Amino acid sequence: MGGQMYFSVSYGQARQRFLAAAGDRGARIETLVNSAYSGAEGEELRTDVALFGAARARSALVLVSGTHGAEGFAGSACQLRLLRESSWPGIAIVLVHALNPFGFSHRRRVNEQNIDVNRNFVDHGRLPHRCAYFALHAALLPADWNGPAHAVADRQLMEHVASQGIRTIQQIITEGQYEHPDGLFYGGKAAC
């Protein structure tokens, strides 16, 4: 069974298990509340920061879970296993549980504003301009998913792939963009 026992079935369960394990280790915990939104089960959304280990350590290990919300299940399991099975003498440990609690709870990559939090760590005074993404945007988000617009979008996307190659198209899509709030890998116009 191994590490599978550390995986939770929901954001709420993951949070409860994390807080219990952090408390058992004597962690100092700070909680940040997202009061504007609620979770998939109506629960409050919270990011918990647990600090434990050597108070005056020269080194610190920082582990963040849930940046891409739905990946929070794996990150939380890793943090829980570290809390239950590991010892790191001489260093401080900072665990940030559920950086994107909305995405974690709703099983989405993005936060409540469709922002890919990982693409949000940029200088918002000088946002990157991604012209290549603009040409793909309509094909990535067709007007319908079951009708003719979807078929047209698929053809357009395949034409881009044929002319530029799959790796280039993948890079264009995943590098992040800051112009289309409804688009893929949207990094936001300000820090979130």
Image (spheres, rainbow, N blue to C red):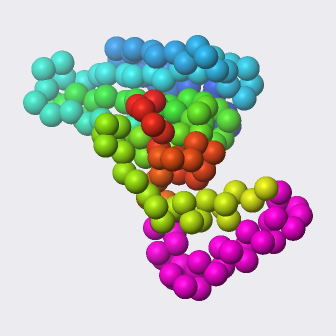
Q: Position of residue 93 (x, y in %)?
A: 28, 30
Numbered disc total:
0
Task: Give the dominant element type of the magenta stretch: helix, strand or loop.
Answer: helix
Q: Position of residue 185 (x, y in %)?
A: 53, 51
- Quadrant of the image containing the C terminus: top left
Q: Position of residue 88 (x, y in %)?
A: 24, 35
Q: Nearer the viewer, residue 68 or 160?
A: 160
Residue at the bottom extreme, as displayed? 162
Looking at the picture, does residue 174 appear above or below residue 101? below
Could you tell me which residue is drawn at 19 percent across and 23 percent down?
54
Q: Nearer the viewer, residue 157 or 67?
A: 157
Residue at the right extreme, as displayed? 147
Could you tell me which residue is drawn at 82 percent across and 64 percent down?
149
Based on the displayed image, in which of its 4 quarters is residue 25 positioned? top left
| Residue 67 appearing in the image | no
Could you tell me which residue is drawn at 52 percent across and 72 percent down?
169
Residue at the left extreme, as displayed? 58
> Going by the image, does 173 lie left or right of 12?
left
Could you tell me which residue is drawn at 37 percent across and 22 percent down?
50
| Residue 179 appearing in the image | yes
Q: Position of residue 13 (x, y in %)?
A: 63, 27
> Going by the image, does 74 lie left or right of 29?
right
> Going by the image, does 63 lie left or right of 161?
left
Question: In the rendered structure, does residue 154 fall within the stretch colored magenta?
Answer: yes
> Going by the image, does 103 lie left or right of 90?
right
- Which residues are drawn in magenta? 144-173
Question: In the rendered structure, does residue 139 fall within the stretch colored magenta?
Answer: no
